[in-house]
């Protein structure tokens, strides 16, 4: 008789996970993140997602000032000991980065939506980044295609731009860039 268990070997039992526990996760192509001590596991994204991510990252990189770094996932953004996220695109001051991660909020966090991550990106990550003081948060929806941009106003995000299809999306902070959502996926 074989006994099945739902407990994953190596995961803490009876306590929230911490940043230190992430080092025990397998290198299996999944994205492992923590939100308030809960493990979030996401599968590898589809081609349309990756295309949008790469094209936007290249546009941001090409327009970035000398003191700013543009990085793509997987790269840890440590908001607290129990909240470590990997935004699809991170824009941060070079001076704020370590060799391993970004200890604190970036200048800009960008998520490209996937069916499996939509609610986490639109609700949980957005909330945690606002609490951490991330001044800019963008969401790219490759299925529409669209880009929505929020700026931190006090403790909450305020929608400041929403472009769809071939309508130009322009930002001046933290990087001056103009893109068309359709061009990110076509």
Image (cartoon, grey):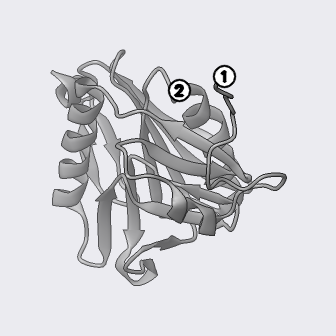
Q: Nearer the viewer, residue 46 or 21?
A: 21
Q: Which residue is drawn at 66% across and 40% down?
A: 124
Q: Which residue is drawn at 45% across and 49% down?
A: 87
Q: Which residue is drawn at 42% across and 80% down?
A: 98
Q: What element carries label 1?
A: loop
- Mark nearer the N terminus (2 vs 1): 1
- Disc nearest the viewer among 2 and 1: 1
Q: In the visual, does 113 lie left or right of 84?
A: left
Q: Mark 1 points at which residue?
A: 1
Q: Name the residue under label 2.
A: 118
- Image location (x, y in percent) of residue 88: 39, 46
Q: Which of 34 and 168 is in front in this view?
A: 34
- Image location (x, y in percent) of residue 147: 39, 31
Is residue 143 depicted above or below 127 in this figure?
A: above
- Image location (x, y in percent) of residue 127: 68, 45
Q: Residue furthest bottom?
A: 95
Which numbered disc covers residue 142?
Answer: none
Q: Nearer the viewer, residue 150 or 186?
A: 186
- Image location (x, y in percent) of residue 107: 47, 63
Q: In the visual, does 109 lie left or right of 120?
A: left
How many other residues sit within 10 Å of disc 1, few (<14), some (14-19) or many (≥20)? few
Considering the image in quadrants, where does the C terminus appear? top left
Is residue 157 visible in the rendered image? The answer is: no
Q: Which of 145 and 4 is in front in this view?
A: 4
């Amino acid at each position: 008789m074989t006994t099945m268990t739902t407990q994953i070997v190596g995961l803490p039992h009876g306590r929230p996970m911490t940043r230190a526990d992430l080092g025990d996760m397998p290198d299996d192509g999944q994205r492992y993140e923590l939100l308030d001590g809960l493990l979030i596991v996401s599968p590898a994204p589809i081609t349309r997602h990756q295309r949008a991510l790469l094209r936007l990252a290249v546009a941001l990189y090409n327009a970035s000032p000398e003191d700013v770094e543009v990085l793509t996932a997987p790269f840890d953004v440590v908001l607290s000991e129990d909240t470590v996220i990997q935004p699809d695109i991170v824009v941060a001051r070079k001076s704020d980065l370590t060799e391993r991660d970004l200890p604190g909020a970036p200048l800009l966090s960008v998520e490209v939506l996937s069916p499996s991550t939509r609610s986490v990106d639109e609700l949980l990550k957005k909330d945690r980044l606002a609490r951490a003081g991330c001044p800019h948060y963008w969401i790219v929806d490759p299925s529409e295609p669209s880009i929505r941009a929020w700026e931190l106003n006090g403790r909450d995000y305020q929608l400041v731009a929403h472009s769809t299809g071939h309508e130009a999306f322009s930002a001046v902070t933290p990087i001056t860039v103009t893109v068309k959502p359709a061009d990110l996926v076509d």
